[in-house]
Image: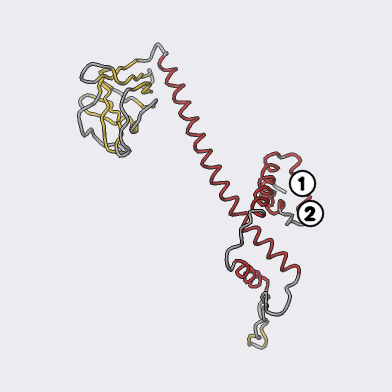
Amino acid sequence: MKHSEIESLLGAYALDAVDVDEADAVERHLRDCPRCRAEVEQHRETAAALAHGGADAPTGVWDRIAADIDTRDAPPPPQLGGETAAPTRVLHPGSGRARGPLSLVAMAAAVLAVVLVAGLGYRIVDQGRRIDRLAGSVQDDGVRQAALAARVDPAARPVALRADDGRPDVHAVVGPDGGGYVVDDNLPALSADRTYQLWAMVGDRPVSAGVLGPDPGVAAFRAPAGLGALAITRESAGGAVSPSEQPLVLAFV
């Protein structure tokens, strides 16, 4: 079997719901695939936790599953002389006739599959959130390292953006390839509906070089050709097409 085919069987294998040939194929695959072994263990842990959760099944779930199984398993009515034979009577729990063992097994497997999918869905969402947070942290660390490297590059230009009182509030650096970084700032945090925005001045025309957010840290930007100055303004969250106020800090480069 292909790896993708094995993966599609892992959940059923964890519940002992595959046939002998499929189980043999999965077990051979698991000997050499640690990722799939881990997934099987996760399936089993989730099923065990849900099985011992002590919660009752939702109202009517057994009847709905039973009806669904009966609908899928019942053969179509035979056609006799152009007339439709009387539909086969389907018996449900409590109708006076016991359901066969195979139907009970199928119903139990269906219920457990529904519960397992719900539990795995929660775990996948939770893992996705953790991966997103980790990816964001890794990206931030990469930007910081690149900014520090640019800051010590002798070919890069350090830029100190100053306020009206001459105090350097923001330090930036622009590399020889036009790649730039805001490496340090003393700007106070803004409310969530506001943001700082970096502008590159080309002649007398301001060009947005990046929306820095309400509480800037290290940030990367691209300096356009003909860069004459850098400036930072306060704007509405999401940034603006052109500055709406005078720069808080400014530096000619």
Q: Quadrant of the C terminus?
A: top left
The label nearer to you, 2 versus 1, is 1
Q: Examine the image and state in which quarter residue 207 appears.
A: top left
Residue name at image x 57 percent, y 50 percent: 121
Residue name at image x 20 percent, y 26 percent: 204
Query: In the image, residue 135 lies at what x, y percent?
Result: 50, 34
Return the residue nearer the eye: 215 or 219.
215
Is 162 rendered above or below residue 96? above
Query: In the image, residue 90 lies at what x, y percent?
Result: 67, 78
The number of callouts visible is 2
Query: In the image, residue 12 lies at what x, y percent?
Result: 69, 54
Is 125 rendered above or below residue 202? below
Identity, as a three-letter code, of the amino acid under mark 1: Glu
- Which numbered circle lies on residue 150? none
Examine the rendering and report whether any part of residue 27 can be seen.
Answer: yes
Query: In the image, residue 250 lies at what x, y percent?
Result: 25, 22
Mark 1 surroundings within 10 Å by alpha-carbon count, few (fewer than 14), some (14 through 19), many (20 or more): some
Q: Examine the image and state in which quarter residue 163 appears.
A: top left
CB contact under 8 Å: marks 2 and 1: no
Q: Which residue is mark 2?
A: 21
Return the residue nearer the eye: 25 or 66.
66
Q: Secondary structure at mark 2?
A: helix
Return the residue nearer the eye: 7 or 245.
245
Examine the rendering and report whether any part of residue 180 can be seen.
Answer: no
Q: Secondary structure at mark 1?
A: helix
Colour option used = secondary structure
Q: Earlier in the sequence, mark 2 or mark 1?
A: 2
Distance (Cα) linking label 2 and label 1 = 10 Å
Identity, as a three-letter code, of the amino acid under mark 2: Asp
Q: Which residue is mark 1?
A: 27
